[in-house]
Image: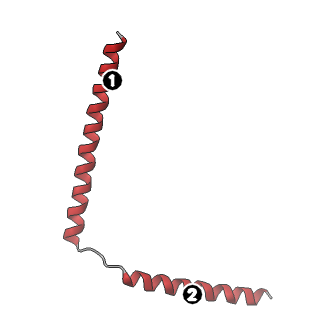
Amino acid sequence: MQEKEKSAGKGQKNSWFRGLQSEFKKIVWTDRDTLVKQTVAVVVITVILGVLISVMDAGILEIINLLMK
């Protein structure tokens, strides 16, 4: 009984890996130039938003400190 379950499990694993392999073949990978441009854009936007949030936080903190005096 256990051997049947083991062989059924192996068949399911093989089928799953074959399906996974066929799905990976369908992926269209971007070229290196596009990947670099998009990565730079994400990093620049992240830095800009980080600075903006930091400035807003400092400004709000100063306003609250002035109101508390």
On screen, residue 60 versus residue 44, left or right, reads: right
Q: How is the image coloured?
A: secondary structure
- Determine the secondary structure under disc 1: helix
On screen, residue 43 versus residue 17, left or right, reads: left
Q: Which residue is mark 1?
A: 61
Q: Is residue 2 above or below residue 45?
A: below
- Determine the secondary structure under disc 2: helix
Mark 1 or 2 closer to N-term? 2
Q: CA distance from mark 1 to mark 2?
A: 59 Å
Q: Which label number is shown at residue 14?
A: 2
Between marks 1 and 2 in the image, the one whose residue lies nearer the viewer: 1
Tally of numbered tags? 2
Q: Residue at x 71, y 86 (%)?
A: 6
Q: Residues within 10 Å of mark 2 (few under 14, many from 20)?
A: few
Quadrant of the drawing holding the C terminus:
top left
**Residue 16: x %, y % from top left:** 55, 83
**Residue 24: x %, y % from top left:** 41, 81
Q: Quadrant of residue 48?
A: top left
Q: Is residue 26 above or below residue 54?
A: below
**Residue 25: x %, y % from top left:** 38, 84
Q: Residue at x 56, y 87 (%)?
A: 15
Q: Amino acid at mark 1?
A: Leu
